[in-house]
Image (tube, rainbow, N blue to C red):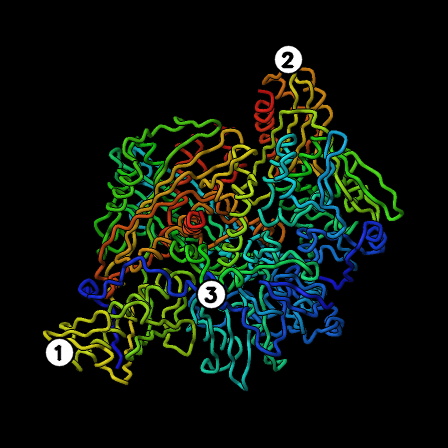
Amino acid sequence: MQITLTINGADHTLDLDPRVTLLDALRDHLGLTGSRKGCDQGQCGACTVLVNGRRINSCLSLAVMHEGDAITTVEGLSDGALSPLQQAFIEHDGFQCGYCTPGQICSATAMLDELAAGWPSHVSPSLDGPCELTEAELAERMSGNLCRCSCYPGINAAIRDAKGHQA
Amino acid sequence: MKPFDYLRAENTAAACHAGAGRGAAFIAGGTNLLDLMKLEVMAPGKLVDVTRLGLDRIEEEAGGLRIGATVPNSDLAADTRIRRDWPVLSRALLAGASGQLRNKATTGGNLLQRTRCPYFYDTDTPCNKRTPGEGCAALGGETRNHAILGTSEHCIALHPSDMAVALRALDAQVEVQSPEGNRRAYDMDNFYCLPGDTPHIETMLEPGDLVTSVFLPAPKGDRQVYRKVRDRASYAFALVSIAAVIRMEGGRIAHAAIGFGGLAPQPWRDIEVDATLTGTTPSAALFDKVADILLQGAETHGGDDFKIPLVRRLLPAVLEEATA
Amino acid sequence: MTIRIKLDDKSEDRADSLAQGLLGTPADRPEGHLKVTGAATYAADDIPGGCAFGVLVRAPGQGALTATNADDIRAMQGVLAVIRDPRMVRNSAQGTANEAPVQGVDSAAYTGQPIALVVAESFEQARHAANALKITADGPPGPVDPQAVEPEGEPDGQGDLDAAMADAPHSIDAEYTTAGHSSAPMEPHAAVAAWDGENLTVRASLQMLKYNRNELADCLGIDPARVRLLSPYVGGGFGSKLGISAETVAAAIAAKELDRPVRVVQHRRQVFETITRRSETRQRIRLAASSDGRLTGLGHEALVSNLPDESFAEPVTQASAFAYAAANRLIGERVARLHRPAAGSVRAPGEAVGVTAFECAMDELAVQLGLDPIELRLRNIPEKDPQSGIPFSSHMLAETLQDGAKCFGWQGRNPAPRQQRDGEWWIGTGMAAAFRVNILSEAEARITLTAGGALVETDMTDIGTGTYAILTQIAGEALGLPADRVTVKLGDTEYPPGSGSGGSWGAASTGNATWLAALDLRQQLASMMECDERDLTLKDGQATCGNTTRALSDLLGGDTLTGHGHIDAGKAFEDVRQSTFGAHFAEVAVNDITGEIRVRRMLGSFAAGRILNQKTARSQCHGGMTWGIGMALTEGLVHDRRDGHIVNRDLAEYHVATNADVPPLEVHFVEERDPWAGPMQSKGLGELGICGAGAAILNALHHACGVRLRDMPATPDRVLGGLERL
């Protein structure tokens, strides 16, 4: 099928087997290999990208279903200079092997927007807000991104630091 | 993944029509379907994309809410009306999956998600749900995540949803459109089928039937609790979960609707439990009694034996919280 | 020139007198920018032109195999080949095997064995065709229950443990079990193989290239000199990429047969089966003690499992041989030969599960004695290796115990269980000691020095451990260069063979080789400066000797100097017992209704010689401690009781710790210099953090609610069982 995907602000027209996932389209057809395949079944978060500003597992989505969507990958987060989150991940050692890192950073980018929108989480004491980025909130909201090197302390410190930077 | 034809439906009627064909399946969020298709546990020959049918709205209706079938789980959980008047639904949704998956998974898809039975996922072992008549590898196998109520000798698989457990306790209705254009609604109590000797048939849906919305009637209880026990702190399916919707009047329970997850092939509710609670004064003895009622006839399989004591401890705690 | 040292004796510390001030600092990882932007290239990322895609096929059962529709599969759209080649491997090779693992596809020794590769023009075509390939297995499953077979091996004894147990006023005789574990690195095993005539290049995800090259060549029956492996970035290893595995061998075979590049990536579900797992263990631990808490008897017997023809046996009791003094001892493993997926090294093989169980038993003994558990350990620190009688190179257990206790706030703890409650939750604290043998492995490194800076090259890998950072720091420190003038290139068999990453030996081994290469250069520079190397100060690109200072760029002009370092372990690792030490502390909450456990905080105090980079070392310890949480609470492979296949072979049902499972973790280093460990005086740290961490959690569980669990993981159902029995 011929489709056009809008990725990091640029249109890409591709002729794809409908079976190609968004993740495989990015990685294998467009060379955007920053989005990683850790499980190919929505169980690790390494493939997290933003679709219309929202974080999703790109491994569990067909590329053909994303015509017209604005897709942002890790490659689209830095425009020459690193984003505050990316910089903070380096400073706080929010990664070791680095494989889950783009997914973590994409996820955190959208997570901070969800927080700003007042979305509650499983650990929110009240559903009415306000949502503070407590340790528990941060950890719960980032639990869709596994890190087997277990850099969670660094990841959380980085996100907290970047959020402070934002504010 | 078997090759398939992909069709993006422009309207609901066209979707139902396309979905009525042999081997067709609807796709919205795809978070469960695509995983199963990659493993060829499911192998539809045609995928009908229903994400652009305008079924993504939540509208007020008759004191309740009509939730479009493709409303993402995260939008539903964050909806201010849901958070205010149906908090058990928000809580159940937020207890499920991950932020990424909730952004993609839809209301209709969540209702229809398939079991996590590892033998259902393993096409090298027999499974009556996957291939009718093949046998059940779970029986005699590893059964920690299996059902203890409502099972049959052909299937002991669990329904894994959190959301559907809350919807059942909230007396939700599932609206369906048929390929002929007819609309009909099922109470949650009547929507799912028990496995019996046809475990591959899980709901009342016929080929081409499309879930278009879920209707949430005005809440009958203001005290709403969702409690989920799982193996890790986040991102795990329930070992057992309970949704309680209670209204108290003058120290007595005026309305009780208790939904259970992790126990049965469908989001579970026991009318005898609800009836026994209704009209009575909360007490530890009462709560123990309803646990007995719930668990009468429960059949465990070794790995899932622990669910009996877990329910006996958890149900009173939930009821105590909801009635306090 | 090469400076080659075999470590037979103590080494002099030189690093403390160097001038650059880079070593030991919490420097950022030099490859950080590539990792946070997604630009670091892992094995599957670089697809060459004309690449075909392969998907492995698993055996649905055991015994002789028949493919019944291979010709139909070959006729499917896009399919290029269905390969069942006798050179394909049964399971991944064991660490440092240096030769092919068991090969063959005619029969399956375990359910899930990779037994074919289907190659197609696209990944989607290959995946579907692989699913469609029908394989039948004719055999009944072999034995799969560790307790149902007669195991191999006998423990080693000293003295008379039975008599010591009978005579002791206090004793513990308990059985502990740990479940099997999957390394589960985030990057699944992947390879892109391409041939140029008779020369093979494979981009793969591997930990130990010099061994892997020989293993792959042996699999294929070719000269290792014809094999080039590239693993510049590895998405986690934890033992799972020590040896060559099915996808790499199959990709190489297919690429040759098709005369085009082939990529093979294992699906996560395949990684669980084809890559070696950590064996489940059953451990009988016996402790006999005098009334003042001195051990008179120590028994640690373990039953582990593996496939036939695998040399590896989880060395559960490795640290028990030297951890505590006791005159009467019985220590060792037995191996049950089973037809479950193969077992091999997973982060801290041996100590991860062995120290954890043993430290639970120590806690039980402390409770029985009414003695503080730290004090019990302090009273039993041996003066020398209790089994062999050789001295310790250094012994820092007491220091880490005391440091950890102080930082955690252990003093004044009420030892009685079931004393603290927070709503539904019981609160308790626990501790455990940590031990991990220190190993050095032969390693080489080359440094090329030009006016612009230094280039370090070795086939060593960075699997997240921080190799890029620490080799930058070692070279920069020794050569007086800031970090931005040092480039480190890794993961290419064209470079000198490093130690590989594994066994916690990478940093010390390849780090020392890098130091020796730098020393080689220092000697050359000293001779150019006409001074003794020891009188040479190198800092910020300046060489100073006496009153003379010259810029390196000036000194070198357009010349290039090459230094080569080569280190190997000698008698310093035979005549002296080398270990790292630590202490774990944990506070947990246990839900009285559901049996759920939440770790509230953890603290580790560790000693491992010189800490080369405070930041990356800390992250390594965070990782180890988190694995301890997983081992104690959530991780366990479930084998089908009928055919042994792994039932929970995905990341939804095999529960590695999520962010929400991990509390704030505090890490302290009790810094020391261990002269026996080599010139850098640094010991391995990557695995110490997991050793015993889970015991601190289980001991805290007991302190919280009075439940003594001896079976890991302590999932809610097991805790609930304990609560019901109280």
Q: Chain of mark 3?
A: A
- The residue that mark 3 highlights is A80
Residue positioned 10% across, 74% down in the render? C546
- Amino acid under disc 1: Cys
For the residue pair C441 and C64, the one nearer the viewer reads as: C441
Residue C393 is left or right of residue C36, and the answer is: left
Question: Dot 1 lies on which element?
Answer: loop
- The residue that mark 1 highlights is C531
Q: CA distance from mark 3 to mark 1?
A: 47 Å
For the residue pair C390 and C509, the one nearer the viewer reads as: C509
- The residue that mark 2 highlights is B250
Can residue C107 be seen by looking at this rendering? no
Residue C159 is left or right of residue B231, and the answer is: left
Residue A6 placed where, x, y %?
A: 63, 63
In the displayed structure, C636 sits above or below B5; it is above
Pointer 1 local density, CA inside 10 Å: few below 14, some 14–19, many at least 20: some
